[in-house]
Every structure is written in C-alpha cells, then in structure tokens.
Amino acid sequence: MSQETSGVSIPTPWRIKRYYLYAVVTAIALILPWITVDGNHFFLLSFDKMKLHLAFVQFDMQELYLMPFLLMMMFIGIFGMTVMGGRVFCGWVCPQTVFRVIYRDLIETKLLGLRKRIKNKQQEPDMSKAENKAKKAVAVLLWTVLALVAAADFMWFFVPPEDFFAYLANPMDHLTLIGFVIGIAAFLVYDVVVLKENFCVYVCPYSRIQSVLYDEHTVMALYNPHRGGHIYDEHKEKQFTKQKDLQAVEPHAECTACESCVTVCPTHIDIRKGLQLECINCLECVDACTTVMGKLGKESLVTWSSDYEIIDQKGKTRYFRPKILAYLSILVILAVILGMMGSTKEHMLLNINKETRLYSVEKTYEGDVIVKNAYTFLLQNTENEKHDFYFEVIAPKGMEGKITIERPSKPFSVVPGRKQQEIVVLQTKEMLVDNDRKDTVIPITIRAYAVGYEAEAEGKKQIVVFRDAIFTFPRADIYRAEAAK
C-alpha cells in the first residue's frame, strides 16, 4: 500500500511493516511452546527432566552435543545478518526493541495518550501533572502484567507449559521457578520503563562488535549528503540548523532542516551525522524523511542502502558478495551436520561396562564346562512411555549361537527418563578358541531392543541400538584343567 504525493509514491512506512513482523514473532513465541508432537516440543531445554527437545524430537542430556551447533548457527546467522543489513536484528527482531515499542508506542501513546505522537520520541511526558502521573502508573502496571507473561513465556522453553502451571499450583515447592519468573519480569520492567534505549546504546555488547562486521556494501539507514547537504563537518560538529544557512553554502542542498528524522529516532541520534553505533536500523528516520520530502515531490534523503551506493556513489549495492555467501555456506553446512546428527537419535541409551574379573570357569553336574563373562548394562529409556527391553548377542562368524545369555532370563521393564542398571552374564559351553599361550578376546555385538519394537511397522518406530563389547575366553590349559576335574 502506498500513497501519491505530488507525483512521488510514498510506500507503506517501514514502521508499519515492523509492527506486522513484531506481531508474527510475538505470536510464534507465545504459541510455539504449546505445540507438541507425540509429547515433544519444537524446542525445550529441560534441566528439570534432563531432556532436550529439538524439532519435536526428544534427546537425552547425554546428547547435548547438538547444542553447540545450534549456538553456532544462531551467532553465525546474526553475524551474517549484520554484514548484510547492519543492526537489522536490533530494529526488527530483538525482544528489547519489541518490548519498547509495545510499551512506548502502544501503551503510552495509543492506549493512554501519555505521549502525544508516535513520531516524536524525544519529548518525554510532563510528569509534573497529576493526570500524567496516574497514566504513568497505569502504563507501568500494564507493562508489569505483560512482563510477567513474557517471563513465563521465556521459562516455557525450559519448563514446558504443562509442567509450569502444575508447579504454580504448589508455589512453595517450586520457589526457584517462581524466583526466575519474578526476577525476569522485574528486569523487564526496569529495562523497558527506566533503562529504555540506553540498553541498546550502553549495555548491549552487540553494538560494540557490529562495526567490525560492516563493509562498504552493508545496508543501513543512511543520509545522502550529496543531495541533502553536509549538515556536519568532518569532525562531526553540527554546522547548520536552518535550510537557508545550508543553501547559502551548498545551493543545491535539499535538506529542509526540519529534523523529523531526529525527532522520531528512538536512540536519540541524528542520522545526518553518519554511521553511529547507536543506530538500530529501525528505519523510523527513513519513514520521517520519506513523508517530508514526498510532500515536496522529492525522494527521501534517508534511505536503506549502503556506503558503496549512497556515500561513495560507486554503483549498486552487492547483496550476495563472497562474504555473505561464505556465511550462508557455513550455515548450510552446520544445518546439514545438525540434521545428520539429529537423525541418528537413539530411542534408548546403553552403556556396557565389563566387570573387573575377566571370566569365570565352572563345570556342571552334567560334565559341561561353562565360561562366563559378567557385565554391567546401564540403560536409559528416552521415550515417553514404559517399555520392556531385552537383547541378543551377535558373535563373530563361526561362533554364531555359541555365546548365550545366562542372565537376565527374560525382558525387564524401564520407565521413561530413568537410568536402570542390570547385571548381565553371558556364557558359552563351547571351546571357542584353542590357545595355550593367552586368553582370547572375542569381539561381539550386543543388539538391545524394546520388545515389540524390534523393527519398524505401521504406527511403530524401531527402538534398537547396537553396542560393541568383548567376550574373554580363557587359555586352553585353564579350560582343560577345569574339564578334567
């Protein structure tokens, strides 16, 4: 949607487009924790149950090797976004900016009328009036309620909603959770009501690293001094405050010195001064200048472009340059690795430890010589329901079926999320190796499975894992000595 003014088309303000994006991002953040597939969330890092849910797949904390890839993708994505669009993350996605817009533009301006105009972010309300003090109190109260909702929403990615509200029913048993929610909400109230955009300017470390990521093709809000005129000198000192004084030096300068771009800036900078760390690329200044110059039938002096195109005037901005393609390539590689590692997720975890004694040899009443090896199986059911587990031994070629399970004799149950230890004894009644010089280590494979889930079937997934182990067979003289008894 756009409007025509003196032959110049004025597009839909960037501010309105940001509002739409804020609404979408907020809806996703509030709704996503409630969506489950087979009891699994899109993202949940539960320290309570020691689980990681990712893309509706549940992983155990022992599988947290996925988290570094997620963090790398997040940071590389933000860095790549900065190289291409400056602090566009700050102006368009960052919760700090979204919360300030909700409080300042929606609550203070639209709902309560404490501020007169959204386009004037420099003039603070007159708090000497009793009416304004009452409105301020209401604004803070409304934001406190929303801050509690935001704090709860943040916690839902660590404590799922179904557990969160159950815990709230017994607050004295979950004081840590209550403390986190209240603490986060209190910080949000202080941040949004008191600290304001000073957080972006002085606290946020992102503003300190962004400048090293910029290049001449980085897109940002820029004032065109070739058209508008040089308001500031090379030392960043302001030279002109009136259009007539500017045009006396630069007759073709188009800047009207109305300072609408300054008045509307949430971080209180003058975009005509050039690149500044405080700029969050919200493009409010672009909207302001577009409106003013549009009424004069001219294009905006402040545009979302690059130094290469606006300041240096060397040509068109190159968006997909080698640096950007490198970031995209790294993101794709990380996503592929993450997908491959995530696809190998096991529905049960199994560690096998052989006991200190290598083996035992005994003779039965029937005259058979039995060699036994004992193991400790540490098993964890990573599913959401109880299963019966058992296993089988896969011996090397030529020894198939000669190594059998002596203990346990039947499947055993394991409840979800709990580690269970089982003593396992494997045995053989055969003379597997005839070696008088040393004991023989025989490689074997343990195939463990959930009973009824040995293979994939309609409506059922396969719950099977394979683990390498060893079976130690004694020297031949030890075996024969036991047989001769």
Image (spheres, rainbow, N blue to C red):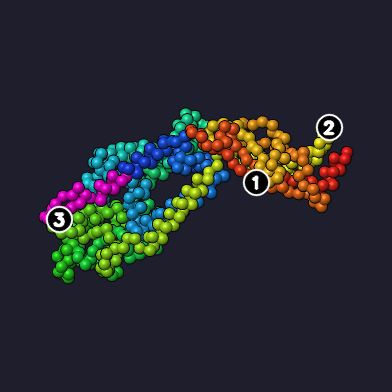
Residue type, numbered disc 1: Asp
Q: Residue at x 40, y 57 (%)?
A: 328
Q: Is residue 399 above or below residue 171?
A: below
68 left or right, relative to 78: right
Residue type, numbered disc 3: Val
- Circle on res. 8: 3
Q: Is residue 112 magenta?
A: no
Q: Nearer the viewer, mark 2 or mark 1?
A: 2
* Residue 123 seen in the current view: no
**Which badge, 3 or 2, is on the more N-terminal residue?**
3
Question: In the current view of this chain or complex, which residue is farthest to the left?
Answer: 6
- The residues tagged by marks 1 and 3 sit, at their Cα atoms, a distance apart of 73 Å
Query: Helix or strand or loop: what does disc 3 sit on?
Result: strand
- The residues tagged by marks 3 and 2 sit, at their Cα atoms, a distance apart of 104 Å
- The residues tagged by marks 2 and 1 sit, at their Cα atoms, a distance apart of 33 Å
Q: Residue at x 71, y 34 (%)?
A: 407
Question: In the current view of this chain or complex, which residue is farthest to the front?
Answer: 398
Callout 1 crowding tier (Cα within 10 Å): few <14, some 14–19, many ≥20: few
Q: Is residue 16 magenta?
A: yes
- Circle on res. 468: 1
